[in-house]
Amino acid sequence: MSVFYMVEMHYPLDEDRAEFNDFYAKHISMLLTIEGFETAQRYECAPDAKAPFMAIYRLKDDKVLTRETYTSRAGRNSVDPVFRAKMTNWDRNLVEGPMSDMDVHEDGWLMLIDRHTSEAPSLPDGFTPLRIIGLDATLVERGALIGGNEVSPPNVEAKSGWTVRLFKPVHQTRYPS
């Protein structure tokens, strides 16, 4: 089982978006210096989504985010207060599942289905279940499906208790230097 740290949020599309993206690129570089962070990739979906931006980090294990090497340098308070004030719908979920990675090629896509309650319908066939194991735990389960430019994303009808989002990568997967 692999462990992923999934950070999602909304950030307004205004004049400081380029500065925010520069900050976040540096923030990812810093996180990748912390022992246990193995990869990082940012994604974006439709701007009208509750949380259209996501960063996914593959971690060595589920203890990485509780170690002093992380808590002393990262977390919500490590974001510049100017940017943090504009970030809304900010959720962090620690998940595990049978995917070795969640890397998406520059022409590919990532579809996520979030099950918000245990009464929500099960994930459809083909989606890899990701079990929520920590942090904000804002979901019951998340399903992931990754595809490339040669395969169109499936037409998944949202069901009661689900959120369905289709993400495109902002940048290629990054690794520790």
Image: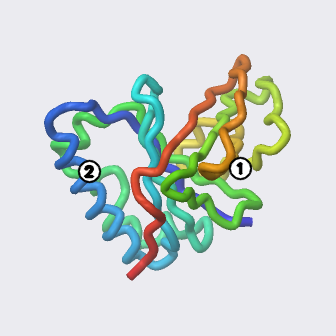
| Side of 11 relative to 104 (left or right) | left
Residue 21 numbered tag: 2
Q: Are marks 2 and 1 in contact (CB under 8 Å)?
A: no
Q: Residues within 10 Å of mark 2 (few under 14, many from 20)?
A: few
Picture quadrant of residue 118: top right
| Side of 158 relative to 46 (left or right) | right
Does residue 72 appear in this view? no
Does residue 53 appear in this view? yes
Front of the two marks 2 and 1: 2
Picture quadrant of residue 51: top left
Q: Position of residue 96 (x, y in %)?
A: 69, 57
Would you place residue 111 above or below residue 75 in this image? above
At 82% across and 35% down in the image, what residue appears?
124
Pointer 1 residue = 130
Q: Position of residue 169 (x, y in %)?
A: 47, 51
Would you place residue 66 above or below residue 129 in this image? below
Residue 109 numbered tag: none
**Colouring convention used in this rendered image of the protein:** rainbow
Identify the image quadrant of the C terminus: bottom left
| Side of 104 relative to 88 (left or right) | right
The amino acid at mark 1 is Leu
